[in-house]
Amino acid sequence: MNDTKIDAMFEILQTITKDITDMKKDITDMKKDMTDMKKDILGLKEETRDIRLHIENVTDKNISLLAENYCNLVQKLDENNKVTDNQLAYQIKVNYLISDMEKVKQEVAEIKKRIS
């Protein structure tokens, strides 16, 4: 009976030893996974920093240049519109004067007919 109890205890110890060995392996795998995860996170941080720097140094600068050029373009367009508006006003005045001149010509022609 003693041998049977010892054998049973030995079997239980072997099972516990195997379980502990399996747990150690699992913990080692988890540590490796954590190390890999830390490397991935550091890589992501670096990529994020690079993206942020690109946005600050390139994209923001280009947006500022576009905005400045847009403002200049709007100013030039406004100036051009003023000139166009003036030209339109002058064209209306010229058309009015042409119309008046035609009336004057007709009146002069009528006066000439009456006189002759």
Image (spheres, rainbow, N blue to C red):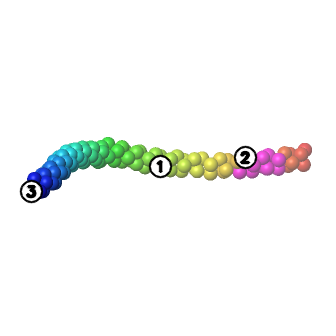
**Nearer to the camera, 90 or 25:** 25
Q: Which residue is mark 3?
A: 2
Q: Which residue is mark 1?
A: 74
The amino acid sitting under disc 1 is: Val
Examine the rendering and report whether any part of residue 7 can be seen: yes
The residue stretch that appears in magenta: 96-107
- Is 110 a magenta residue? no
Could you tell me residue 50's position as x and y percent? 27, 43
C-alpha span from label 3 to label 2: 134 Å
SS for dot 1: helix
**Nearer to the camera, 15 or 78:** 15
Mark 1 crowd level (few <14, some 14–19, many ≥20, 10 Å Cα): few
* Quadrant containing the N terminus in the rendered view: bottom left
Identified at 27% across, 46% down, the residue is 44
**Mark 3, mark 1: which one is toward the viewer?**
3
Q: Which mark is residue 98?
A: 2
The amino acid sitting under disc 2 is: Ile
Could you tell me residue 80's position as x and y percent? 52, 46
Identified at 9% across, 56% down, the residue is 2
**Mark 1, mark 2: which one is toward the viewer?**
1
* Labels 3 and 1: the sequence-earlier one: 3
The reply to whether dot 3 and dot 2 touch (C-beta < 8 Å) is no
The amino acid sitting under disc 3 is: Asn
Could you tell me residue 111's position as x and y percent? 85, 49
